[in-house]
Every structure is written in structure tokens, then in C-alpha cells.
Amino acid sequence: CLDVIIATGGTGFSKRDVTPEATLEIIEKRCGGLETALHLRSLKATPFAALSRLCAGISGSTLIINVPGSPAAVKECFEVLEPLLPHAAQLLDDEGTKEQRDHQHPTKQKHLSQQGAK
């Protein structure tokens, strides 16, 4: 089982850009916050990032992310993804250990569902 799949390219407006459509066919849950974070980072570099149709979602226990194909855009997106991916993969691991399920965020905050739980 793969924790994360990252596809680069195919997120533009041309007829051949169909990566988001292919991804949307197989994901069960969209990751809107992740999509927003990726767009916001890319928009800091260029207004043309608004033309990206990148998407992110979950299929089973795998996170699937589409990012634009230009080397600069890939680098920008990885600046966002690098600190998030280990935690995202851990959250998707339903079979994790009790310690993993009772994990804390790097900020030392527990999930809302865990607050008050002993």
C-alpha cells in the first residue's frame, strides 16, 4: 500500500491536461485545505498559478496529490508538502499503534477528538 502518490503535470487548461479528472475518478475525499495551501504558496511566486487545476484527495488509505509540472511549481509545492506529508500519512494509517493514534501535532496540540480523553 502506498502512503502518498504525487503526480506532476497535466493540471493546466489545455486539452491534454487531464490529470485532475483522472484523479477525481478515483479519490473518495477531497483535501480542500491542502489544495488551498498549495495554491496560496504558488500564487506568492506568480499570478499564473491561478491557472493551475491542481487537486488532492484520499483513495482508501492513500493520499493523491496533483501539482503543476514546471520545476519551479514543483519546488514551491514541495515547500508546503514536506512538513505535512509525514503527519498526513500517519493519520491515514488506520492500523497504527496506540501511540500513533494518540499522537500530538508538532505544536503539541492534540486532535479535538482527543481533547479531554485520558
Image: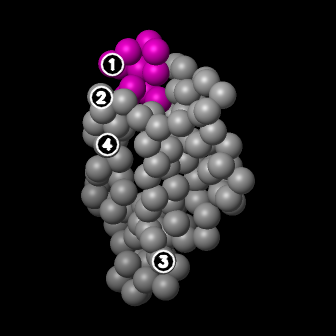
Indicate which disc residue 1 carries.
Answer: 3
- Marks 3 and 2, how far apart in space? 29 Å
Helix, strand or loop for disc 4 = helix
**Would residue 65 appear left or right of 102 to someone viewing this image?**
right
Q: Where is residue 111 shown, x and y percent of the image? A: 46, 63
Instruction: List the residue tagged with mark 4.
Output: 78
Q: Where is residue 104 shown, x and y percent of the image? A: 34, 66
Residue 91 versus residue 4: which sits nearer the camera?
4
113 vs 81: above or below: below
Indicate which disc residue 72 carries.
Answer: 2
- Marks 3 and 1, how far apart in space? 34 Å
Instruction: List the residue tagged with mark 1.
Output: 45
Q: Residue at position x 63%, y 39% from top?
A: 18
Which quadrant of the figure has residue 29? bottom right
Q: Residue at position x 54%, y 20% from top?
A: 51
The range drawn in magenta is: 39-49
- Marks 1 and 4, how far apart in space? 14 Å
Helix, strand or loop for disc 3 = loop
43 vs 94: above or below: above
